[in-house]
Amino acid sequence: MGIQSAPSRSPIAFVVPTMSPALRPTTARPPVENQPPPPPVGLRWRSSTWFIVSTVGMGIFTDMVLYCLIVPVLPFMLQDRIHLPDDQIQSQVSNLLAVYAAASVISSPITGLLADKWGTRQLPFLLGLSALLIATFLLALGQTVLALVVARALQGLSAAVVWVVGLALLVETVGSDRMGAVIGSIYSLMTVGGLISPVLGGILYRKTGYTGVFGVSIAIVIMDLIMRLLVIERKVALQHEQQSVSKLQYGHDRPSPETAPFPSNDTNENTPLLGQRRPAGDPRYRLSSKHTSKKSFLARHVPILVLLPHPRMLTSLLVGFIQALLFGTFDSTLPVAAKETYGFNSLRAGLLFLALGTFDLFIGPLAGWAADRFSPRAVAVVGYAWLAPVLTLFRLLAVPSNDAGVDTSREIALFCLLLSLCGIGIAIVNAPSLVEAGLIVDAYHRANPELFGERGPYAQLYGLNGMIWNLGLAVGPLVAGALKTWLGFGNMLAVMAALCAGTAVLAFVFMGRKGDDEVFEEAGDA
């Protein structure tokens, strides 16, 4: 009975409450100053796929609207504000358009190189918009040709940043296998901006003068700025999510590698792409030691050049170049041909671009989806094979007589119909170039992470693609103008048809099929 008595335990029971606080067992709690910062307000929707895609789309829309909004106003600015002689206005307008293209060509690869080296996409995205805002103020207030030249150069720089950084941000958000549908939708949004802004610019200038034109421009830039400031990159969102999980499970924000949780396999549109484990690279995409050793200066600093000899890469760049060449061809020759052939004024000639671009609103997203679902190769072949006969048919249009009273409505209707059919083909070939190049880079990035780094050379890729595309946009008017003068409008388009047919053949031969794993064989190993 004595063994069961409690008095022998009672002193111990009274000691525990009177223990020194220093000796009392406590749970480990980090100091207040080491607590992780609270997550940003609206973290989920600000890092969501729909918001990031919308922001990039808004940036490209803004760039296109401000580019086209100013174009119909430039001749009046040069005449009324800067007081240039009439015989110099056309040449100066052409020079200002060329400055924009040249600035984009030069800055695209540089932007891609710097964007891959920086730790953030948002910073260069904001810097590009800053350049656009400065350009808008220069156009609104500039009193010299030099001020307008600087403004157009800044617009070209901003366009390069939007395309390069924006597309790199998109591929990190949605993945290479979904870029086709996204790019198709982005191009459609760009088409909307390109179609409505010249008309809007002309109306605003006529009704309100420069105040309305540049007031609307600045308002659009401010809306774009707000969206870019709100965007949270996926990798930043991932850091906040990991800190929240770690704090709940371990009581601190930095678990050790041994106890850190593996990423969940449950993904949705808000799951950060960069937070998932990348699939192991296909060994057939493994580059030789001469590349992975990084002994080449260019391979160390511009690793995208290692893939440039790849036949699929070269073909994808060619597909984009020919598409831009067609854009430049119609931009430079369509108004003049309509005036010479049918006596159109500037308004009626401008309305022809509605026939050329309207189908892009519907066909672009569908063609992008098809590039994801089937293959960029199939879409490129169909698009360029479609364009070849349609462009050739322009040669069959009868040239109206110059006699007064001759009814040309039938020829004009056929002309608009052919333009619409061309618009379908151009919309189809919007996405294949970027999607194909992205798939190639993604495959080699997974197989060679030590060469391309954690984020991969995606900004470099889109910088290279942007340079080639803008080069086609600049070369197109020069080549088309010379051919039109030499051969005529119909025969010039027949030459373009031959280029499209050749591009379709090259795309069929060299671009990858669905699920195709081509092995890279470096050109010029000798």
Image (cartoon, rainbow, N blue to C red):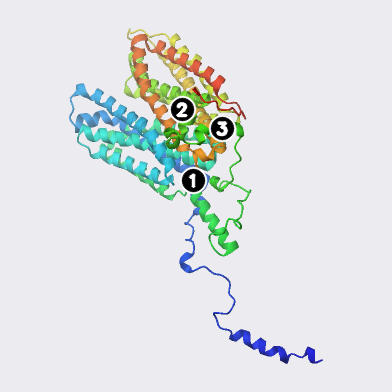
Label 2, label 1: how far apart the Cα atoms are: 26 Å
Residue beneath disc 1? 51
At horizontal 61% and vertical 58% (from top left) the residue drawn is 259
Residue beneath disc 3? 369
Type of amino acid under label 2? Thr
Q: Earlier in the sequence, mark 3 or mark 2?
A: 2
Q: Earlier in the sequence, mark 1 or mark 3?
A: 1
Instruction: Judge whether 73 appears above or below 25 on screen.
Output: above
| Comparing labels 3 and 2, the label whose residue is closer to the camera | 3
Label 3, label 2: how far apart the Cα atoms are: 19 Å
Q: Nearer the viewer, residue 496 or 449?
A: 449
At horizontal 37% and vertical 33% (from top left) the residue drawn is 197
Q: Are marks 2 and 1 in contact (CB under 8 Å)?
A: no
Type of amino acid under label 1? Phe
Q: Callout 1: 10 Å neighbours few (<14), some, many (20+)?
A: some
Q: Callout 2: 10 Å neighbours few (<14), some, many (20+)?
A: some
Q: Nearer the viewer, residue 372 or 301?
A: 301
